[in-house]
Image: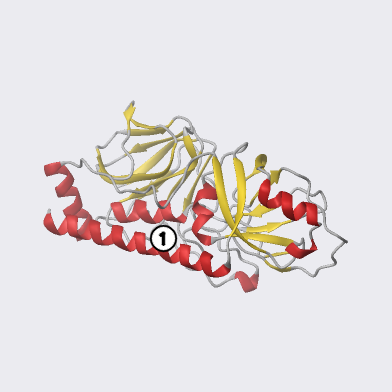
Amino acid sequence: MSIKILNPGVLTTVQDLGRMGFQKYGVVVGGAMDSYSLRLANLLVGNSEEEAVLEVTLFGTKIQFEKDMVIAITGGDLQATMDGKKAVMWRPIWVKKGSTLHFKSAKKGCRAYISFAGGLSISNIMGSKSTYLRAEIGGYKGRALQKGDVIECNKLGKAQQDLLKEIQHSGNHWMVNYHPLIHTEQTQQIRVIKGTEFDHLQAKSKEEFFHHPFKVTSNADRMGYRIEGPSLSLTAEVEMLSEGVTFGTIQLPPSGDPIILMADRQTTGGYPKISHVITADLCHLAQLQPMATIYFEEVSLLEAVQLMLEKEKMMDEIKVGLRLKRTKA
């Protein structure tokens, strides 16, 4: 089984949940920008939730299927069509050999995810199939997909074979409820906790950070989003050693325009860390396009942990629901 890339679009890469355990050597975690959409895509086709998928950005990606397959599409609504007809999202789909999947343009959100029953036949590099573009590590030849690339898919296990029979015999007329987990609107309230240098901001900048909107600029990619709004200022220059940073860290460079570090961020940074986006909201952040609007809302560390646990509880409920559905089928 294989798929062929007819058009890679703006950016299409192989991603999983990231390369854990190597940050001390300077190797970033990387992985899917919207990990909840990736996990749901895999669960829908009977894969383990950490399996590698394709991450499609904004528009233009076109894929041809060289065998009958079961896939699922999740994440942002990039107006996907299958052989010219609207492709359903958030449920497993049986795709016939020769069919073409095309992502026309982003209607809601920024990134879609395509899972393949059985998974992609991609080698693990340092425990992950994710593509780290800047270092050319992992994924398909360490790079973004190009026209003419052919990627093999693994053979179906028993769970995927049962799923294929279920879809062929009865069809699917349901979808998983993703709304509590993933938001794709282009104006969003993003929750943060204060960073270690937040108190170095001038009083006016502290007030503006939480009460004025910020725009995502065109300088936004898998490494980070530069955002514009009120220019933020420190009370005095802060001399810092380079320190560890993470997905969601908000740094303040001398320009006064904050940078939000994303999945492919560096492992350390020397700019003041004024805030951190909470884990539960990283998937919402990943779905913002350039020119999207962000309002920051402060929560406590305890609230951030509770919100993450609530999302994990929702994921567990979805897993149980899918398991029961397949048991009854």
Count of number-bearing discs: 1
Colour scheme of this structure image?
A: secondary structure
Residue drawn 80% across and 63% down? 200
Residue drawn 57% across and 39% down? 289
Q: Is residue 4 above or below residue 43?
A: above
Rendering coords of residue 64 (x, y %): 36, 36
Rendering coords of residue 314 (x, y %): 35, 59
| 310, 32: nearer the viewer | 310
Q: Is residue 250 above or below residue 88?
A: below
Secondary structure category for the residue under label 1: helix
Q: Name the amino acid type tagged 1.
A: Lys
Rendering coords of residue 315 (x, y %): 35, 60
Residue 317, visible in the rendered structure: yes
Where residue 323 sits, quadrant-wise, is bottom left
**Looking at this rendering, what residue extends furthest in the top direction?**
84
| 254, 117: nearer the viewer | 254
Instruction: Tell me: 210 left or right of 34.
Output: right
For label 1, the crowd category at 10 Å Cα-Cα, with few meaning under 14, some 14 to 19 and many 20 or more, is some
Rendering coords of residue 25 (x, y %): 64, 72
Instruction: Tell me: 7 left or right of 39.
Output: right
Residue 121, visible in the rendered structure: no
Residue drawn 17% across and 56% down? 326
**Looking at this rendering, what residue extends furthest in the right direction?**
236
Where residue 298 sits, quadrant-wise, is bottom right
What residue would you read off at disc 1?
A: 311
